[in-house]
Amino acid sequence: MAAGDLREGRIVVVGASLAGLRAAETLREEGFTGSLTVVGDEPHAPYDRPPLSKQVLLGQATADTTELPVRRDPDADWRLGTAATGLDPLEKRVLLADGESLPYDRLLITTGTRARPWPNPAEGALDGVFTLRTREDAAGLAERLDAGPRRVLVIGAGFTGSEIASACRERGLDVTVAERGPAPLVGALGGTLSKLAAVMQRNHGVDLRCGVTVTALRGNGGFTGADLSDGTRVDADVCVVALGAVRNVEWLADSGLAAGPRGIACDAGCRAFNMYGIVTDDVFVAGDVSRFPHPLFGYQMLSLEHWGNAVEQAEVAAHNMINPGPRQRPHLTIPTFWSTQFGLNIKSVGVPTFSDHVVIAQGSLEARRLAMVYGYQGRVTAAVTVDMAKSLDYYRHLIETAAPFPPPPGALDRALAADVPIPSDVPDPKGLSHGPTVALTGYLPDRRLTVLRPTS
Ligand SMILES: Cc1cc2nc3c(=O)[nH]c(=O)nc-3n(C[C@H](O)[C@H](O)[C@H](O)COP(=O)(O)OP(=O)(O)OC[C@H]3O[C@@H](n4cnc5c(N)ncnc54)[C@H](O)[C@@H]3O)c2cc1C
């Protein structure tokens, strides 16, 4: 297809959130003049999720004020409140819940994730039990917190669960956090920083219970408490289930795409793979629903639940959708993530779980201000700063250039000698309550994540 033709035709984007909006804007910015349709099952214009567990729960903003700023009008036909239910890649049509089917020349999938529900639906339906992913979730939970519950139980101490617990304490509410793993954030940051996270939670008055699972939610209509695996019971009137996310891929079950529980596999140019591992040239993927290979992390498939990745990948996907092969760009972002909780500003660059050792390169655990560098087989693969965000760019450069690990003592500010590296102590995610926000999945020949169906 000639370069000019790619700027015309019909593009459909499924998923009207951060990645979908940024892709739609980029398509127009880069000269796409054809018809653009954005399908989203939520009834709202695209909105921002990070404030939902921060400003909204703290009462500093309401959930309906989190709309994403629009950089330029994407001049799109917005099909909001309508779910895509199927994809026919031969006819090149997206099937919608209202019975309509949308033809496309190129398709972008940005259907992201949803909150993993409590496994027992009857218990999960008790009044006062929440998950947190959408505007409605945040508005409902904030309202309950406003009403001053006696105690809030948070199940899962990943980033979302920990931020919710932090917001509760800032509001002066009693909160219990239950986590199956040994400490909060351990799946994302490894052993050393998770110990600091545990100290911070307890210092801020959180009743932190690690190494336990919640075995049952109790209540008769309304939630009243939960049973824990150690035989104790927590009395509470609000429960937040923060068990991680589930990829929104079910609607692709019969599509023949490589879509499974870890997301939709695509190449570094955001082009989706079909279930035989053949790359498609008209279906693209971006954001939390994607998994893509990254040369800096052993070419393993990387699944991220990161705001910055959704934006950057959407921009690359949009660019590649309207440019011929030689002009296409790879999505080689270095993952970044931030979180604010218990008065700490935590920032991460790279993939901390892709590590065997860590070293404190600046600051100290005692000062609660530090930069921790992660290494894998003698090279730098990640860094996490606590209240030291300015250093992050320096560490990003070390990751990009595969610099040797450990970095030389005082490499950045000469203020402090680097410690002796210690094991990074990243546990198997299976032992945690919450799902990981970063997952690396190498090629596992004994497992197939898609169901093969014969085509007729
Ligand atoms: C509470 C919370 C706090 C967060 N905090 C941070 C943070 O501090 N830092 C950070 O880096 N990241 C954070 N994140 C993650 C960040 O918000 C996500 O990475 C980002 O939203 C991903 O954007 P996306 O467009 O890929 O997917 P999503 O935002 O998940 O959007 C996907 C959209 O597609 C829709 N959809 C799904 N299936 C269909 C279908 N079949 N048909 C039509 N539409 C469909 C969904 O309803 C949704 O609207 C946070 C997320 C949450 C929930």
Image (cartoon, grey):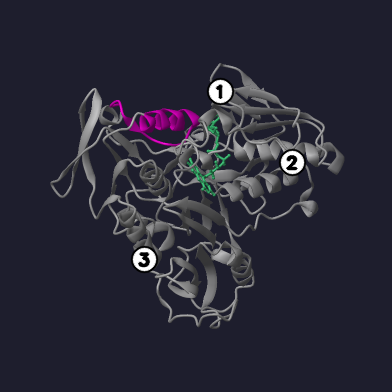
Q: Is residue 326 magenta?
A: no
Q: Residue at x 51, y 51 (%)?
A: 303
Q: Is residue 176 above or below residue 409?
A: above
Question: Is there a contact, CB below 8 Å, between mark 1 and mark 3?
Answer: no
The residue that label 1 is drawn on is: 43
Q: Secondary structure at mark 3?
A: helix
Quarter residue 122 falls in: top left
Q: Is residue 410 above or below residue 156?
A: below
In the rendered image, residue 395, in percent from the top left (x then y), is placed at 59, 69
The residue that label 3 is drawn on is: 191
The residue that label 2 is drawn on is: 26
Q: Secondary structure at mark 2?
A: helix
The residue carrying pointer 3 sits among few (fewer than 14), some (14 to 19) or many (20 or more) residues within 10 Å by Cα, namely many
Amino acid tagged 1: Pro
Number of residue marks: 3
Marked residue nearer the N-terminal end (1 or 3)? 1
